[in-house]
Amino acid sequence: QVQLVESGGGLVQPGGSLRLSCAASGFSFSRYAMSWYRQAPGKERELVAGITTTSGTNYADSVKGRFTISRDNTKNTVYLRMNGLNPEDAAVYYCNAKRGAPWNTNYWGQGTQVTVSS
């Protein structure tokens, strides 16, 4: 079955770094655009970063220059390198896989918690 398993979250001090990983299985990973979303308490889920099947990337303005998304199709894994973390980055981070028309398929991981605190 389809699985997206995030890892790498945790507690980090302001200014610190983390690398999130999302291991995919059960579908053709290389054919899917991959994204990271986050949701903080009381807020809507928001797009953080995305990477296309040809490794084109896009970022939310709030993370540009600090976060880097990448993918390794040989490992069926997408990464999010996060530098310069601040308390506003604290949230549950979710991995998403999407394939457009005509398949219109969309998968979500269970999320990994990122806490930024001194």
Image (cartoon, rainbow, N blue to C red):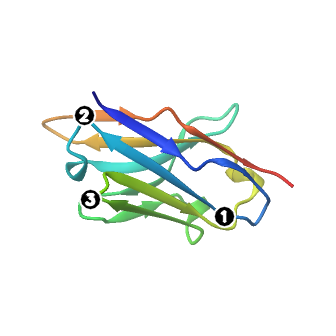
Q: How many marks?
A: 3
Look at 25% across and 47% down and name the residue there.
Answer: 29
- Residue 74 is tagged as 3
Going 82% across and 51% down the picture, which residue do you hit?
117
Q: Residues within 10 Å of mark 3 (few under 14, many from 20)?
A: few
Q: What SS does tag 3 mark?
A: loop
Instruction: Work out whether mark 2 precedes mark 1 in sequence or the reverse, and give the earlier one.
Output: 1
Q: Residue furthest right?
A: 118
Residue 89, percent from left and from top: 68, 52
Badge nearest the viewer, 1 or 3: 3
Of the residues shown, which amino acid type is indicated by label 3?
Answer: Thr
The circle drawn on residue 64 is: none
Instruction: Determine which quarter of the picture holds residue 92.
Output: top right
User: Which residue is under mark 1?
Assistant: 17
- Secondary structure of the residue carrying tag 2 is strand
Task: Locate the N terminus by quadrant.
Answer: top left
Label 2 – label 1 distance at C-alpha: 32 Å
**Could you say where residue 112 lies in the image, as x and y percent from the top left?**
58, 40
Evaluate if marks 1 and 3 touch, with contact meaning CB atoms under 8 Å apart.
no
Left or right, 34 with reference to 36:
left
Which residue is tagged 2? 105
CA gap, disc 2 and disc 3: 21 Å
Q: Nearer the viewer, mark 2 or mark 1?
A: 1
